[in-house]
Image (tube, rainbow, N blue to C red):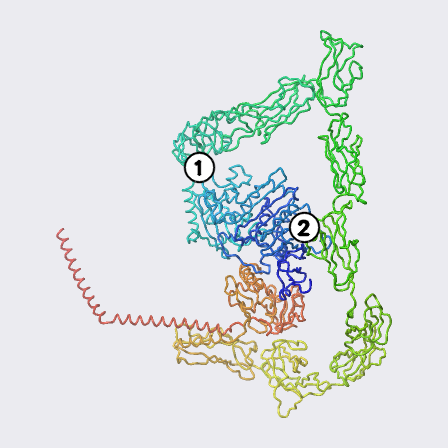
Amino acid sequence: IRPHETFVLATTDRIVLDFDKFEELQDGRTLHMLQREDQALATATEELIKFVPHYDTLIKGGQSEYYNSEGQKSLAYALAELIDNSLSATSKNTGMRTIEIQMVFDETLAKPTIIILDNGCGMTSKQLKNWAVFRLSKFSRKNSYVRPEPVCRSLNSDVSYFGVGGKVAVFFFGNSTRMITKSIGSPDVHELILSKEEFERKERDNEDIYTSVIKNRRPGDSSHLKKDERCLRSLIAEEHGKESFTAVVITGLFPEHITFLKKDFKVWTRQLAHVYHYYIHGVNGKDTSSCSSNSDHLPKIDIQITLCEKPPKLPCALNLREVDDDMQTLYINAAVDTFDFTASPKDGGTVEGLIRYHPFLYDKETYPEDPNALLDDDDAWHQTRKKGLVFDCFWNGRLIPYTKVQGFDWCSPNKGAKELAECYNRISGVLFSNDVFEVSITKLSFMHLEDKLNKKDTFFTRTVNSQNQRGNIQKEFTQWLKNCHEKWDKQVKFLGYTETITRTDIPTKKMQHPWATFSSIEWDGKIYKEGQFVKSMKTVPILYGRVVRFLLHGKYDNSVFATGGEVEVALVRRELFGLNTRLYCICRAVFVIKKKIQKLTHRNPELLTVDWPEGKPWPQNAARPAGTPFGKLQHVEILNKKRELLSMMPSVSQGAGKKLIVELKVVEHGPKADQEILCYSAQHSRKSGFWFNKIENLTKRGKYTLSLNTKMHETNATAFGGRELPSYILKFTINVSATLHVGVPFDIPLLITDGYDHSVPLPPDLKPVLKCRWVTTHGLTCGFIQQQLYITDLKTYALNVTLPGLKSDTQTIKICLLPGNPHSIHVTPEDDTITVENGNPVKFNVEIQDEAGNITARPKQVICCQVLSGFPLVATDCSVTGAGQLVTKLINLKIINGEPQNLQVKFEIPKIQAAVRQLKVLPSTRVSRMELCSSDNLVLTNNEKIDWLAGGLLDNLFYKLYDEAGREVPPTAKIASKIKVHWTGDVNIDDLVEGKLPAVHVPTQVQPALFFEVSYQDQNLSVSFYIVPRPDEPDRLKATLLQNTVKLGEILPGSISQYLNSPQILFLRICSRSVLVTGVQFQSGPLGPRELCFTYRSFVQRVIIKVTAGVPAQLKLISGPEKVRKLTLVGTLCSQLCLYFYHSVSSTSSTTLCYTFQKVRVLLLCCSTRGHYRLEFKGSFNQKPISGPTVNLTVIPDPNKPVSLLVEYSTSAVFPAGGHFPVFSVTVVSDEGSPMTTFNPAAASMWLWKGEPSGNAPPQAVTELKCSKPMKNENNDRFHFRDKEIPELVGKYTIQFSLQMGNGKVLFSNQIPINVVANQPVKLGPNSQLPTPVVSNSKVMANRTLVENMTLRIMVSGNVYVWQQRAALINRLVMMENSPGEHGSAYILLFKPEALMVPTPLVPFELPFHFSNDVDRFLKEKVAEADQILKTPRRVFSIQDPFIGQQDVLGMVGHLASVQGDDAAWVISWHIRGDMDCVITKTSAAAQRIYDYTGGRQQVMALDSVFVHPGNRSMPHIRNDRLLFDPPGNPVHAMDLLQYPHNPENCIIAFKNILGDTILIDDLDSAINYRKAVVQNKLPCPTILTRQGDRVSAKGKFGGAQNKALPMNTLHVFGAPIPQHYYTLKQQIDLLTHHRSAVEMRDRAAKDREEHLKNIMSPKNLKRHEEMEEKEKQLEEIQRQLGMFVDLVLLLFR
């Protein structure tokens, strides 16, 4: 950077740095120093990155392998992972989203490669680094993930999730991947290469595996690629003009994957079209019947797949939008109606679903079949459909292939009508879920989708016009299915019932009977009757015939509807089908034939024709010489009567006909039997039809028959439908052999006969004469002519054999000549000396010839070519053609002085003489040498050193290029582009074309030689030189120190010449233009900065050097204490001792270098606390001793230091329970043994606790008592503790006194154990405090009860004392009815003991009670008292519980229970302090919800995952309800002290899991003894806690900080329960409430009775009573008169 030149410092993402951004950078980042922000990179740069796998790699590394593909080919789903990344990258594109998948399997372009290219947003180098980290999901990255807004079908393109799939996919395909990407707004392209080979190399070399480099380059720069990577070069060349993109290049593909991708192209593209169906075609899918396929609302996603193979195969291109046979397209286009619904699980998330109906049409189910399925049988397919409804599952719009959800309860056939049972097999479904439902990291299957949807709390609603319709979804679905069945399913109506028959042609007996026959059917609005000509559909083969009758299985006697049946057809024209004339044909669709069936016979095979070579056919019964070739038969054709070419039987339906083949057979007719010598079959090809190769092995004399027969491909039958297929027959004869090889002798047997065909011997003087061109004769022997003919040409000749003197003296035979045996090697060009330019290969054409020069071919003819002088061997195979081409390796020789070099080329083949050619290698015209020169033609030699003025400019440099002949090569633009200059990147290409080089700026500072280089990259030529900057004339003096500090007595770094006595005297050594000063040493003087002055001529330079302390040499004591008092056996000297270190060399300077120690700890190892001591100081430095001084010390006692507390009391005193302690006098004793009176009485304390002594200090939570005021006559040299109350409970206690000395120091006395004994009885009292009863005048006994189940005992000062084991039990004491008492008054009930032998009278027990008939007032008092208890402060658990009240949440452990005593609450809370804030839930789902909500910070425990033993375990000292030993310390289970306000059953489970069988006991001694007794009984002992805060673990450990409870104020402790009195008040309140209600009901009933009686005795009622009596009298009179009238009538009748 030149002075005053501006520049910017930027990251590889082109973020310009300022001071703030620079502070945020991490170490190891790569930066670009540029002239401007958008400057193009002059060359590619590399950025070192580290991509250590995310920690999820370890946490979730145990999951199953990615491509566990359930027996399927998983390559399509591997590609889907890469397409997912492209979908996410292009999600914000405003225009077309293009994703290209290029598969290059043409090795002429590159190694097999897969490229996935998209036009998405690209990646910065930081994002590319994140991509390389395995399992770094979008949630784990620093940039906060924003969930996309909900859209229909969840088509949000948010499918790139876990940071796993892309990397796993690329390494599933191959061994290496190259990521090429460019982000929006960035001028640079970033490249990253990950390869298995590189990982293995780093592991082998013990390097960091997870490191690589990101290459940053300009778009279109492919200079870093290898020459054979042509495919990548073309890909990079297309980068120009692209705003952003990402390309994934996969190489090192596995062969089995390549085979599958090429062979099953349609299979995996169909799978991809299924996966992304709704992204490609929109929310409604691909409906081929809809006209909206080209509308603008469709997604702008274009997924293009290209497959390139080696020519002559053409590239195959396919857009996934064009696929029309993926399963979703088949489902959509086969459906006639849909049922939309929405599922809402309780845990969250939304699932959209729809069910499609595929109707039954006449004879078939329209439910689509999977094109990839292997089931061809309809019954097998139908059997699989019996499984019912199966849903395809989509996640964020893309298919999850391995999850198939079975139907739900409301759409199950078990819940539907029986008549719709078949309809449940005609529906298909699809589910669309969002990302709330988890999928596997490879997106092959859902985790819990089906389980969540099948939960009872999942809510399903039907969706109509995008609106949810409330209702019974099962009822609505059943109605929809019924409507589809009635509207869309088509059936056949059978008419004209004839009879019921039994069919014996059916193998299953169950299906043979009954079959109803009908005369006609009605089908799709048309009627078909007996006698009609029909053509069957969906049968193989297609059948034609006349209808005989229609059949339907079952018992019918009238017309009936059915989904299908059978028709009996009398077939016609057997030659059409190859079947019998009558056949029961099962068909579900028939159509009347409109044309005559006879016309179809014209399409059958009729004639077989043969096209002979050169149009010269062999005639019938022809004779041919042995070895005569037969064929090649290039065109064998099968014709019908219309002279149309056929390759298969004509189709009589929509399907294809059966294939035909042609069989060639040659049979030799021998004297005994015929023998088949050849048999070939030919299938039809589109280019050449039927054809057969040339036959050359017909050499045996005899008669032959050649036949060409047309056959069926599947059955090899020569007839179809009773008619023979066309054939061709040729008969011929093979005569004597006439096939000769050039240069090979042959024999001609001669047979001489007389006129009657009798064989006669050959006369001895008769010599045959042979006449043939190029024939020589050699003689006659044994009656045969052994003639050697040397043929010099390859033709067919006539050989005349003449016997002079015979009647028929000449016969002619035809001979065919073939090439002879290999004789020589012919090499072209034929020049004696062949010239070639150095650096090029040589091409030779070679031929193997026989003696006559004909090219001949024999097996295993391989010609080897060797260029002598160490060049590699090349070879070519001439076994087939006899000729070949040889190309040598590059001829690279070292040309000396431009002279050509001569070589020999040798051509060899076994058993043939080698051929040799001379080769002259001429100097090449390529550049082979470079020179650098200046304008004055001064040539620089390689590695030459140049002295140049520092800060100068070396310009006018030129370069020259020469070829191997020494000829200068003029520079061109192409040559200049390959010239690279080492010292600058700013090169003018025009100057390089002219041969000029940029100027070299020599550094301004003199330094070692600098390296410079010029290179020509095309030929790896370079010229280098060194520039040594030399200084100009001196203008100033500069002094440089290697270091600016030196220790006293040491020499500055450098060669020490001598030691000088004065630092001003220097030793100088002249070296070039500099002076080296050595031997500088400071031996004395003050520490700090010193100045060195250098002068040269008139120049002066001063430097500052700092002198520091030297090496310690001596200890010196400069001050110390006069007296040191001994405080403890190992003490600390309170005064300061200052020690100085100085050198032992003598010096006149008075200054001494010293080290000062502010405080020295002295260990006084002596037996006495006072006396005389000697203190010696010693030191060492670098393991060398340093002598020191000696100090004599006298230790005297300190009268102002307290060392102990002296406690005085009456040791004979007895401690009765409830009484008072004797007076304790406590004296503070000083170090010299005298009492101290300087302490405040408030600093003295008396500690009292129940239990054994605990050591030096009292335990936690003990009783503290303060000292009493001194009396008038008492001395002030001690503290007095008087009138302190003795505890009321009998037992062992401990007393200890303490003194606060300030600064947190406490002085304790020895612990004094005491025994509290029973006191004299004083009163009578109950076991527990009784509430004040309230009674009233009532007939209800409960309202008059004073006492119930009360036990009175003899008490000692308020506590129970069992005196002579006597007690009084009062079951119930009730007040009499109507007892006198004043409302609202209080009374006292006295219980007085009598006839007891006690020293003093006992105080009676007084039980106050209230007499009240005003229940309301008394009830208000009790309620107020209960409220006051609730408002009274008590111990609470201080941590808030934010989760309390949520579903299935119990709460935090500290809130679930309460503990009565402070000591029990303290030690239990400390024991489980790690669990006190744990949240207890009923279900794991609730625990998981809290865990997810808090990000894992809240500890939770689910009770459904906890097992505890039922019931309560007994204490360890109890077995079978018997005591094993007498337990000390009142042991109890800690669980028994817990009280549960809510959910006691669940809380007991939780605390059993947390506390287990932990025991609480009084003190540590009791705990130790208890554990010992348990173990002696061979039982395990659980953890024991003491009320004093100690813990004995289940392993027996106790003591130490970990087993001692922390102070109570530092812990979160269980809360205290509500006092028992509160619950007693609640019972009283309930009783009073019931009493008031009963009284009100009684009063109301009495009032009603009184009103009723009053109403009865009213005047109105009395008057009515009188009127009623009067009426009764009148009625009696009427009845009397009526009786008299009846008697009179009866008398008259008589």
Residue 771 placement: quadrant: top right
User: Which residue appears farthest toward the front when viewing the image?
Assistant: 936
Q: Judge left or right: residue 1660 versus residue 1589.
A: left
Mark with earlier residue (1, 2): 2
Residue 518 placement: quadrant: top left
Above or below, 395 against 1553 in this view is: above
Indicate the position of residue 523 as horizontal and vertical percent values.
41, 35
Q: Which residue is at a point 24% across and 71% down the rendered structure image?
A: 1658
Asked whether the viewer can see residue 450, the reply is no
Residue type, numbered disc 1: Tyr
- Mark 2 neighbour class, 10 Å CA radius: few under 14, some 14 to 19, many 20 or more: few
Residue 1682 placement: quadrant: bottom left
Structural distance between the alpha carbons of marks 1 and 2: 68 Å
Helix, strand or loop at mark 2? loop
Residue type, numbered disc 2: Ser
Indicate the position of residue 1059 as horizontal and vertical percent values.
86, 73
Q: Judge left or right: residue 1485 versus residue 221.
A: left
Indicate the position of residue 1135 as horizontal and vertical percent values.
74, 83
Look at mark 1 in the image and give the residue it sits on: 362
Look at mark 2 in the image and give the residue it sits on: 223
Above or below, 544 against 768 in this view is: below
Q: Judge left or right: residue 72 versus residue 581.
A: right
Helix, strand or loop at mark 1? loop
